[in-house]
Amino acid sequence: MAVSVDRILRWKQTGAPAQPITVLTAWDVMSGQIVDQAGADIVLVGDSLAMVALGYDTTLPLTTEDMVICAKAVRRGVKNALLVVDLPFLSYQTSVEDAIRAAGQMLKIGAQAVKLEGGHDEVVETVRRLVQWGIPVMGHVGLTPQSVNQLGGFRKQGKTPEEGDRILAEAKALEQAGAFCVVLEHIPAELARNITKALSIPTIGIGAGVHCDGQVLVTADVLGLSAWQPPFAKVYANLRQQAVEAAQQFCEEVRSGQYPA
């Protein structure tokens, strides 16, 4: 059965223990097919593709047009999982109207929800308006990569009581604005536990410990395709090295006349 926004929203509201929600990223039709066939509950076309697929150092250069192209491809590969697409930097921060326009583009090409970073007042109001217009929203607090310059790098957030209180307040505000779940990135496990207990919507952790309602990782990190992985990512395969070795063998066989036989 295909996963829906309503199913995710009610994940922890049924009163019965539920299995953790699984979220993996995708950036083209092939990666979409792989994670969908693997049984991920949510496939996220994350703006991490700026670094994974396009070679940028941060997510900031990504455009709405880039996301549309990649999301269209992923949509062709995903049949069962809930498809969520990140709104890129400056596609929603400039005005609510711009946010509605950008989010609408994603839903028109087959996304079922969008994800926004941050939980300050302006973002919360944008989330509220998007939900009012029938656009499901996934929130994202803690380490927000689109604010990397303001945060001084990809550093762990919420390490002080003041930061923890702020992140908790942001998560609560996103829930009240209508977000159907919220990503908690790179924060202390105890803070993630407190936020998860405080919310009636699911939390999705990434580098936030074991107490969240679900977990997300970048698929390129999971498969060992990335040249670098964050410290909290677990590498389940070493496909990058296998791919290099396979390509090297092809080159050697062509040069030696072994291929084609």
Image (cartoon, rainbow, N blue to C red):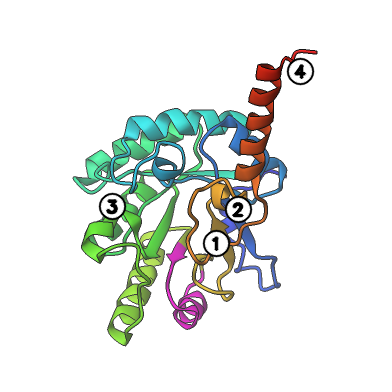
Residue 175's quadrant in the figure?
bottom left
Gap between marks 4 and 1 measured at Cα:
40 Å
Q: Mark 3 to mark 1: distance in Å?
A: 31 Å
Q: Is residue 109 above or below residue 35?
A: above
Looking at numbered disc 4 in the image, what kind of residue is underneath it?
Gln
Quadrant for the C terminus, please: top right
Residue 94 in the image: state x and y as whole percent: 19, 45
| Circles 3 and 2 in contact, beta carbons < 8 Å | no
Residue indicated by mark 1: 233
Q: Which of 124/56 is in front?
A: 56
The numbered mark at residue 126 is 3
Marking on residue 119: none
Specify the amino acid type for callout 2: Val
Q: CA distance from mark 1 to mark 2?
A: 7 Å
Is 82 inside the magenta-drawn segment? no
Which image quadrant: the N terminus?
top right
**Looking at the picture, how far across and down is residue 160, in whole percent?**
32, 84
- Callout 1–callout 2 Cβ contact below 8 Å: yes
Q: What amino acid is at disc 3?
A: Thr
Count neighbours of disc 4 (C-alpha within 10 A) and say few if under 14, some if 14 to 19, many if 20 or more.
few
Number of residues whose C-alpha sits closer than 10 Å to that of mark 3, classed few (under 14), some (14–19) or many (20 or more): many
Along the horizontal axis of the image, is 100 left or right of 150?
A: right
User: Which of the 4 quarters of the picture holds residue 195?
Assistant: bottom left
The circle on residue 258 is: 4
Q: Amino acid at mark 1?
A: Ala
Tags 3 and 1 in contact by the CB under 8 Å rule? no
Q: Which picture quadrant has residue 247?
A: top right
**Residue where numbered disc 2 is placed:** 222
| Residue at the right extreme, as displayed | 261
220 vs 46, nearest the viewer? 220
Q: Which residues are magenta?
A: 183-200
